Image (cartoon, rainbow, N blue to C red):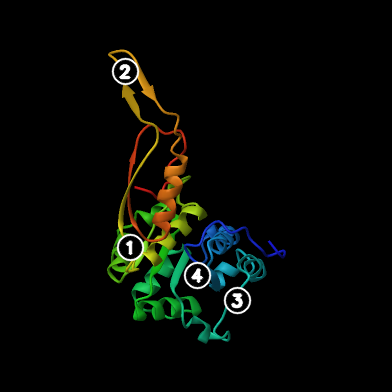
Amino acid sequence: MSSDTGVERLGDSLEGRRVVLGVSGGIAAVDTVRLARELRRHGAEVLTVMTQAAQRIITPLAVEWASSGTVLTDWSSGMSQLDDVDGVLVAPATRNTLASHVHGLQGGPLMMALSVARSRGTPIMAVPSMHHDLSTDPVTDDLVEAARAQGMAVVWGPDQEGKRKTVDHVEIVARFAHLLNATKKSRRSVAITLGATATPMDDVRRLVNTSSGRTGWALADDLYRHGHDVSCIAGLTTAPQPAWLP
């Protein structure tokens, strides 16, 4: 890390990728700093677009520091910066944002970015955040179904404390990287065996190796982030399985 805004590189699954990080007005916007820096840890160049509601939760200055890039907040900003974008990630995505996108409403630069991406076939992923009652409203189901039909990937988080929260920022970036890379011609279907295995010696005893599965999970994670279709065949493991892996 060469400066105050530097990050430790953890991978290259987003190397050379220019992505839009859309931030709408859910309380989960407080995690934008972590999310922007996680995107950069995997090589992404981040252009952030914030709604007016999001700016009441987290300041553009904090997001600019985290993303080490441009933050668009209004129509007066240079909209030409939306050109040559490889993917759009909206986190958090409020129900209003989903509805506006589905119906083509242009309430600000974020909605413009989403419309441009949809028209060009650019990958879009949304991570909704809302109260439980809103998430279970049949209208929300209709909006999500319509958004998916239009090509948007929608990733729901856990239902906790009366709210549908966003998933962890590490998982968001892993899933987003997979979405962007899954269209590569080099994509393959890969099966990985991992973890400890046991071989019977007799009716009572058996030989077991001490593999924790950590290396196998790490390999599977890297392949997944690079867009491959990964299947994991796990034996006995002590290392935790990444939540986004099958």
Q: Earlier in the sequence, mark 1 or mark 4?
A: 4
- Residues at discs 1 and 4 in contact (Cβ within 8 Å): no
Tag 2's secondary structure?
A: loop
Q: Which quadrant does the N terminus fall into?
A: bottom right
Q: Is residue 78 above or below residue 93?
A: below
Residue closest to the eye, 84 or 161 = 84
At which x and y percent is residue 228?
35, 58
At which x and y percent is residue 153?
35, 64
Query: Circle 4 is placed at which residue position?
Result: 22
Q: Earlier in the sequence, mark 2 or mark 1?
A: 1
Query: Which marked residue is nearer to the observer: mark 3 or mark 4?
Result: 3
Residue 135 relative to residue 66: left or right: left
User: How would you rate the neighbour count of disc 4 (Cα within 10 Å): few for under 14, some for 14-19, many for 20 or more?
Assistant: many
Q: Amino acid at mark 2?
A: Met
Q: Earlier in the sequence, mark 1 or mark 3?
A: 3
Query: Circle 2 is placed at which residue position?
Result: 201
Q: CA distance from mark 1 to mark 4?
A: 27 Å
Q: Is residue 57 above or below residue 198?
A: below
Q: Amino acid at mark 4?
A: Gly
- Residues at discs 2 and 4 in contact (Cβ within 8 Å): no
Query: Which marked residue is nearer to the observer: mark 3 or mark 2?
Result: 2
Q: Residue at x 53, y 61 (%)?
A: 42
At which x and y percent is residue 29?
55, 61
User: How would you rate the neighbour count of disc 3 (Cα within 10 Å): few for under 14, some for 14-19, many for 20 or more?
Assistant: some
